[in-house]
């Protein structure tokens, strides 16, 4: 008999506690306004809660179909068609997932074989790299252009090899707030056309694009749609990040492989929330009005920030606003964010956290998905800078 716990060789040796957890912990400890982690501090539409609780009281509480309930898959297919003029078959091409995070890892595990290369554009959402590593793939980071965060297609082309299995893109982009233009998507389509490279298009902020610009979903581009897993998140769209429900739209042959993995890593996604979402989606207004809702908050926040010495970067989409800190402080990004949280009482996230090698360009990210009074409190504190 031994009570020794066997020593593990970590599958993800580079992964530690992520910066969001660290900054949120520090914000709570210091009573700081938390503009770090990306989630709303306001309630969702009560109609959505009623629709979900209604489903629960009606007894819709057992396993749903593995791929998601038909009504929700249908609602998603209808929305995608209305917005992006591409019809996905709800039976064979739409799958409901436990948030976008599970959708992305499932797509990666379904297509990446050991030794395959996957291109990620840095800065990028923190799950992509470990997902690729868990699949045995090789991460090929390509930087977005520092300063503008626009894609550099020469660099992407140079990173492609016969071993490239997939590229992961994200527009509207977390953390920079950049939105890819039609020309960007056309360039990508042209670049991928002669290859078998798959596209994982993380579109969780699809309904947060400002100044009358349009979201350029991969679904709008037939050459991209034919090779893409398009990922979205109800959590972001309906202010319910804690519900962790999203979806993937992909051609039938890709969806078949996706569902093989989905079946064994989550199997199904909770039933009453799916029914509630299906009912709620009958009215497109909540997502149609989302750009105006968040643009007002963005503008309010930007106006206030203009009173500081931060240099504001554009925020074309998402609920993030990045600022250059050079005129305010000589500190590195992470040290600055810690200082800002403890001394000024506002939490932010360093952009270096979104780079594998921690590239520091003196830019930090604020989240403006907050009540006006929360934003105002943060702005009053930041006005000292
Ligand atoms: C770019 C990006 N992708 C995916 C996700 C995860 O979405 P979900 O909460 O639906 O898993 C987030 C959440 O912050 C995100 O910013």
Image (cartoon, rainbow, N blue to C red):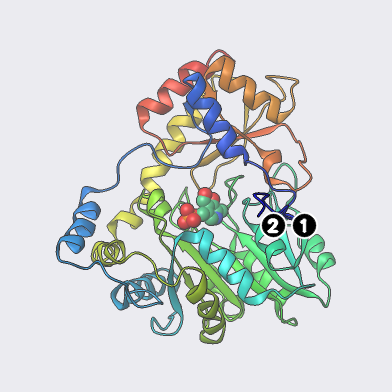
User: What SS does tag 1 mark?
Assistant: strand
Q: Which mark is residue 129?
A: 2
- From this view, report whether residue 31 is shown above or below residue 268: above
User: What SS does tag 2 mark?
Assistant: helix
Image quarter in which the N terminus is found: bottom right
Residue 192, horizontal then vertical, whole percent: 71, 76
- Residue at the location (40% across, 49% down)? 242
Tell me which numbered mark, 1 or 2, is placed earlier along the sequence.
2
> In the image, is 46 to the left or to the right of 307?
left
Q: Which residue is mark 1?
A: 141
Front position among marks 1 and 2: 2
- From this view, report whether residue 80 is shown above or below residue 337: below
- From this view, report whether residue 3 is shown above or below residue 68: above
Residue 207, horizontal then vertical, whole percent: 43, 56
Image quarter in which the C terminus is found: top right
Tell me whether the residue at label 1 lies in contact with that at label 2, contact meaning CB atoms closer than 8 angstroms.
yes
Q: Residue furthest left?
A: 58
Between 344 and 30, the one nearer to me in the picture: 30
Q: Residues within 10 Å of mark 1 (few under 14, many from 20)?
A: many
């Amino acid at each position: 008999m031994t009570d020794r716990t066997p020593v593990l060789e970590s599958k993800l040796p580079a992964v530690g506690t992520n910066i969001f957890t660290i900054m949120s912990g520090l914000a709570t400890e210091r009573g700081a306004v938390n503009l770090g982690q990306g989630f709303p501090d306001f309630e969702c539409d009560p109609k959505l809660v009623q629709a979900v609780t209604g489903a629960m009281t009606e007894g819709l509480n057992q396993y749903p179909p593995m791929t998601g309930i038909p009504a929700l898959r249908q609602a998603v297919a209808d929305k995608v068609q209305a917005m992006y003029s591409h019809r996905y078959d709800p039976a064979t091409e739409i799958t409901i997932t436990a948030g976008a995070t599970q959708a992305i890892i499932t797509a990666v595990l379904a297509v990446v074989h050991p030794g395959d290369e996957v291109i990620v554009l840095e800065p990028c959402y923190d799950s992509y790299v470990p997902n690729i590593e868990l699949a045995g793939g090789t991460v090929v980071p390509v930087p977005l252009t520092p300063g503008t965060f626009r894609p550099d297609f020469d660099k992407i082309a140079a990173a492609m090899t016969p071993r490239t299995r997939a590229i992961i893109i994200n527009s509207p982009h977390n953390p920079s707030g950049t939105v890819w233009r039609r020309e960007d998507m056309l360039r990508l389509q042209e670049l991928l056309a002669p290859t078998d490279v798959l596209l994982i298009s993380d579109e969780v902020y699809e309904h947060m694009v400002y100044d009358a610009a349009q979201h350029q979903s991969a679904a709008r581009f037939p050459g991209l749609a034919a090779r893409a897993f398009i990922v979205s998140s109800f959590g972001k769209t309906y202010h319910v990040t804690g519900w962790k429900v999203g979806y993937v739209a992909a051609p039938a042959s890709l969806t078949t492989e996706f569902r093989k993995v989905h079946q064994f890593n989550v199997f199904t996604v909770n039933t009453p929330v799916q029914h509630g979402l299906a009912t709620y989606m009958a009215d497109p207004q909540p997502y149609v009005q989302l750009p105006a809702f968040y643009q007002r908050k963005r503008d309010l926040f930007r106006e206030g920030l203009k009173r500081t010495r931060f240099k504001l970067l554009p925020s074309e989409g998402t609920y993030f606003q990045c600022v250059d800190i050079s005129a305010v402080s000589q500190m590195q990004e992470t040290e600055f964010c810690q200082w800002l949280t403890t001394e000024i009482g506002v939490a932010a996230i360093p952009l270096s956290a979104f780079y594998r090698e921690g590239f520091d360009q003196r830019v930090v990210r604020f989240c403006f998905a907050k009540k006006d009074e929360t934003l105002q409190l943060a702005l009053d504190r930041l006005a000292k800078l």
